[in-house]
């Protein structure tokens, strides 16, 4: 668990990179039960996908981002909330760059609010940093 006195506004989470290949997307489909053809059928996706090809599940992207926040927070029990605004689909075979930045530290509540995001190699947003947030609990050293 991160200590309240060690977290500062503007602090950046370590960047994570995650490659979304077809196998990973298919495994996610099996785990989630979402077998929409957009995620596995190239001919179908070529006709209907905004990218012209197969895309990863939005919730897979959010799950990867959640894992990055969880690691920074010190475990899943410290993540109080996540909210995301999806900006664009993620093509299969893309690599996501996942990150976050501390926007606010609430000493009284012993929490930090983070802007979180996921972007493609060209910088285009998959999860929008302006509208996506995580709130994590901090160790107040007996003060909270």
Image (cartoon, grey):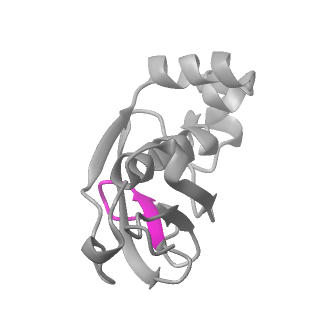
Question: Which quarter of the picture shows residue 87?
Answer: bottom right
* Residue 34 x/y as whole percent: 74, 26
Residue drawn 50% across and 48% down? Answer: 66
* Residue 115 drawn at (x, y percent): 46, 72
Residue drawn at 34 percent across, 39 percent down: 18
Tell whether 131 sits left or right of 142: right
Q: Does the magenta-highlighted stretch encompass residue 116? A: yes
- Give the answer, above or below, for where 98 lies relative to 92: below
Vertical order, 45 against 79 (above or below): above
Residue at 56% of width from left, 18% of height from top? 26
Instruction: From the top left corner, tell me how far across and down residue 43 is, in percent.
Output: 63, 24
With respect to residue 115, does 16 lie above or below?
above
Residue 90 seen anywhere in this rendered image of the structure: no
Q: Is residue 138 visible?
A: yes
| Side of 60 relative to 142 (left or right) | right
Residue 121 magenta: yes
- Residue 50 percent across, percent down from the top left: 62, 50
Magenta segment range? Answer: 114-124
Near-viewer residue (112 or 5): 5
**In-front residue for pair 144/48:** 144
Location of residue 103 by image quarter: bottom left
Describe residue 23's horizontal placement relative to residue 49 as left or right: left
């Amino acid at each position: 668990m991160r200590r309240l006195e060690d977290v500062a506004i503007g602090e950046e989470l370590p960047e994570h990179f995650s490659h979304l290949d077809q196998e990973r997307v298919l495994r996610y489909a099996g785990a989630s039960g979402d077998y929409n053809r957009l995620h596995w059928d190239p001919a179908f996706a070529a006709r209907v996908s905004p990218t012209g090809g197969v895309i990863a599940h939005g919730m897979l992207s959010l799950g990867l981002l959640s894992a990055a926040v969880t690691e920074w927070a010190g475990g899943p029990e410290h993540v109080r909330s996540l909210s995301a605004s999806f900006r664009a689909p993620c093509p299969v075979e893309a690599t996501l760059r996942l990150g976050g930045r501390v926007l606010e530290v609430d000493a009284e509540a012993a929490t930090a609010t983070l802007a979180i995001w996921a972007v493609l190699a060209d910088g285009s947003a998959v999860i929008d940093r302006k509208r996506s947030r995580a709130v994590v609990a901090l160790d107040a050293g007996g003060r909270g």
